[in-house]
Image: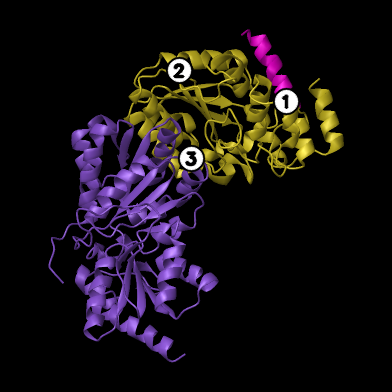
Chain colours: A yellow, B purple
Amino acid sequence: MSLNVVADYAKEMRRKIISMLGLSGSGHPGGSLSATDILAELYFDGMRVDPSNPKWEDRDRLILSKGHAAPALYAALALKGYFPVEELDNLRKLGSRLQGHPDMKKLPGVDMSSGSLGQGLSAANGMALAGRLDDKDYYVYVIMGDGENQEGQVWEAAMFAAHYKLDHIIAFVDHNRLQIDGNITDVLSPEPLKDKWQSFGWNVQQIDGHNIEQIATAIAAAKQVKAQPSLIIADTIKGKGVSFMENQVSWHGNAPKAQQVEQALSELA
Amino acid sequence: MEEKKKIATRDAYGRALAELAATDKNLVVLDADLSKSTKTADFAAVAPERFFNAGIAEQNMIGVAAGLAACGKTPFVSSFAIFATGRAYEQIRNSVANPQLNVKIAATHAGITVGEDGSTHQSIEDISLMRTLPNMTVVVPADAIETTQAVKELAAFKGPAYLRLGRLATPQVNDENYQFKLGEAVLLRPGRDIAIFACGMMVAVALEAAELLAQENISATVVNVHTIKPLDNDSIIDNAGCCGAAISVEEHSIYGGLGSAIAEVLAENCSVPFARVGIEDKFGQSGSPDALLRVYGLTPTAVATRAKAVIAKKNSK
């Protein structure tokens, strides 16, 4: 798929994210908007998936380890055709398949339940091991937050992936530099992320996480790496695409009001 | 009671896994640097390509198991009970139990009979932690024979499960013809005066206590409640109801384990004088297993004494 088309999907995803959060009245716009371009490139270009067969054994898997960015994942899955786009309106409502954080038991296309930070990479390790045992060539993609790198389990998982040479794991760090309580380097610095991951035995690239071409190129390069897991540090802007949300930590976990939805959608027209 | 050969449930676990390796190709095993102690090394010896040492990193190990299960594998993960259920509790909750993934947590060195290593390594809260999780099955085998069968049944059963195993070699309470059925408590000895519900190595202790009581013309029922969740409510209600008095016996805290589970059923269905025999509100300590069982009131004599106190309550009504 051409990168322009992917960019169009990304813009449509951002519109859906704003609309669904406006309707739900709660949720996490900032980190959803920062991860949008990565998810768009994966679902509309990079990943081998079939929305008509969400449990396809040979599919690539995606684990949204920063599960609070669920609206971005839901927007991608709906636009890809896993479920009706109208269902996005039910985000976080009682009885909805679109839970506050992704639930693999409820929603088709969700490969792993997530939400409690730090756990996604471990599950990816298991999926990659299973693929190797079964002689399958699927890739397992993971999207982590940069604040999430404060979790000890992430580093247990990092060691495991490198030790077992899980080269079919391609993980992203959505490096938007903000977490609920402020700047990641003020709260508890996980930096220097690149050096840390490299010293843990990973192949590491650092890119502009809003440049579709760079994301696609980095994925292709990661696939060339053998016997080593790959990490892509995607430098992003929290709240990307909505002027009043960009780089504002206050938009980590607050839903826009009706007027703000209107303004955001006009900016994303 | 006839002296039978003592075998640790962890030994039976390792052997059962190794046996299953040949027939169940989906079986994978993970350990956290304790494979010689948990006996998963037996599996590693026959199926090294399906054994993964996660190192001393239990939280990741549980997540790896979840990912393997999400791709159709049947992972058994092992460590000591304190680390498997305590260190990785929230991973078990959110990555295994909630998404109902087919992960079997088989933890050894449960209870105070870990012995000399002391309280840091003696898990007395694990049944409680696992029992409270929706979707989780909890099994505490009484002996090696039951362990072997439980491992096979849990490997075939789809869903998260916790299997609680011990370090200490303990007596056999079942014979070779025994048939383990998940969720069905086993009446080992019928009696009239009090029902003793036990799990794990305390089943053998309960049987000995029943012998002691018999010498005083007290007739005790002994029930092996190997599956704590789902609990065999009918067996609890029937046996406690018949005897009009009951006690529970477990090598675990009296809070949240077998005793609590039975108390909940009895309080709602069949109120009879009842006591929980287990570890009171305190931690373990270093010592030989036998000495610790004595200090914490988990010997046949101590159980018999507690039983008589409950019978006295019944008779004073």
Q: Secondary structure at mark 1?
A: helix
Q: Name the side, left or right, on which B123 lies relative to A185.
A: left
Q: CA distance from mark 3 to mark 2?
A: 22 Å
Chain bearing tag 1 is A
Q: For the stretch drawn in magenta, what is the main secondary structure? A: helix
The extreme top residue here reads: A2
First to last magenta residue range? A1-15
Q: Mark 2, residues whose alpha carbon is within 10 Å: few (<14), some, or many (≥20)? A: many
Discs 3 and 2 lie in a common subunit: yes
Locate the N terminus of chain B and report the quarter of the image it occupies: bottom left
Q: CA distance from mark 2 to mark 1?
A: 32 Å
Residue on which disc 2 sits: A222
From the top left corner, tell me how far across and down residue A208 is, in percent.
59, 21
Q: Nearer the viewer, residue A184 or B99?
A: B99
Chain bearing tag 2 is A
Among the two numbered marks 2 and 1 on one chain, the one whose residue lies closer to the N terminus: 1
